[in-house]
Amino acid sequence: MGSSGRSLRVAAVLCGVASAALAQTGGPLVLAGRVVRVSGSDSLPVAGAFVVGHHVGTQRQGPVDSVRTDAAGRFRIVVARPDSAGMYVVSLRYQGIGYFAPPVESSDRAGAAAMLLAAYDTSTSGPPLSLAMRHIVVTAAERDGSHRVMDILQVHNDGTTTRVVADSTAATWRVRLPAGIVEVEPGEGEVSPAAVRLDGEQLAVAAPFPPGDKQVVVAYVVPRGIRTLRVPVDQPTARLEFLVELSGVEVSGAGIREVESMVLEGRTLRRFTAEHVAAGAEVTVELEAAGGAGRRFTWIVVVAAGAALAAGLVLGVRRGGAGRSFAAPVPGSDPEVLATMIAALDERFEGREAGTPADEWLRYTSRRAELTERLRAALARGVSA
């Protein structure tokens, strides 16, 4: 699912919890606009494109209708009884790649009537894909001395075409991971796990990359016995950031420096950043020995920390006491982070009940119910504030 798809799902979670009943709006909703092919600085209409309108809500979702564009690339889809608690989006496939317009709420009649769906030609070549941002979250030691890591990579395509693989064995983009890590798994990013594989010490991604940014997430474990995590920088990186649940360690290399800390669920996490990091640099994190169960974060909190960093949500500065720290959106209080966590769960499990073990499905439904209840409370606090 791309960035529009993820934004759509998160927004739908927020809307669905804020209004549990599926009330009807006062009249049909018109999804209308144009499909254009972006070529350099030009936008050319796409005639005959097959456009699908989608409804996404917490209780129900699916396509509502489909049409073909006219000679000017225009389309018009009428939703007779729109869901006021849901979101709507239009999509198409162009040269085998799926594209989405920004989602709209049913109350946004003006936005729904002026949608722009952009598509691009595909190419196996072009300007090198680059790393706009890389966020790395490192947990304190588990009881066995291992450390869990979430690596969030924002890949930028500066070209004018969607980058695709030359053949089924190739990769559109690669990045070198630290040596010695284990249990490497794709995370809840904007790239299908099926398009990500480990090739030696490199993460190879075969997904298409349209112009702009696309997020790749990978999780891995630094096993017991490795006391220094060495993160290689094998390509120019505009911004590199570490978030560490380690109080007395040293993070060094690549011009990295410590900045204001981040507070999450009452814990202070140290932050280190570097900008315009050249290829060939290396950052080292001195890890601690085995930790105690009472001081470790759960993995879902690490996911939330990563989501906060990747979404650029670490914004507000909270002052007080002897110092100051960046107040991150925390899973217990911030609707956006809670909605992101619910959306990530849904992306992993929705439609897969038949193939999921019963105990795992029960954990999913229980966790989702818990997060939904916390989201309702957070929204209620926001309304009363």
Image (tube, rainbow, N blue to C red):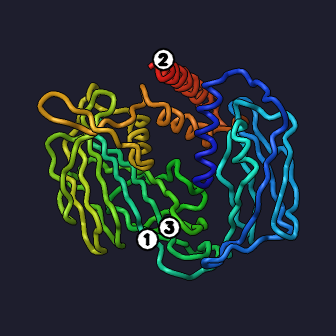
Residue of label 2: 384
Residue of label 1: 130
Q: Is residue 216 left or right of residue 360?
A: left
Quadrant of residue 354 within the rendered picture: top right
Q: Amino acid at mark 1?
A: Ser
The Cα–Cα distance between marks 1 and 3, rounded to whole angstroms, is 14 Å
Foreground: 170 or 58?
58
* Percent position of residue 231, x then y: 29, 61
* Percent position of residue 24, x then y: 79, 27
* Percent position of residue 263, x then y: 28, 34
| Nearer to us: label 1 or label 3 | 1
Q: Secondary structure at mark 1?
A: strand
**Disc 1 to disc 3: CB gap under 8 Å:** no
Q: How many marks?
A: 3
Foreground: 110 or 23?
110
Q: Is residue 222 left or right of residue 170?
A: left
Q: Residue at x 65, y 52 (%)?
A: 102
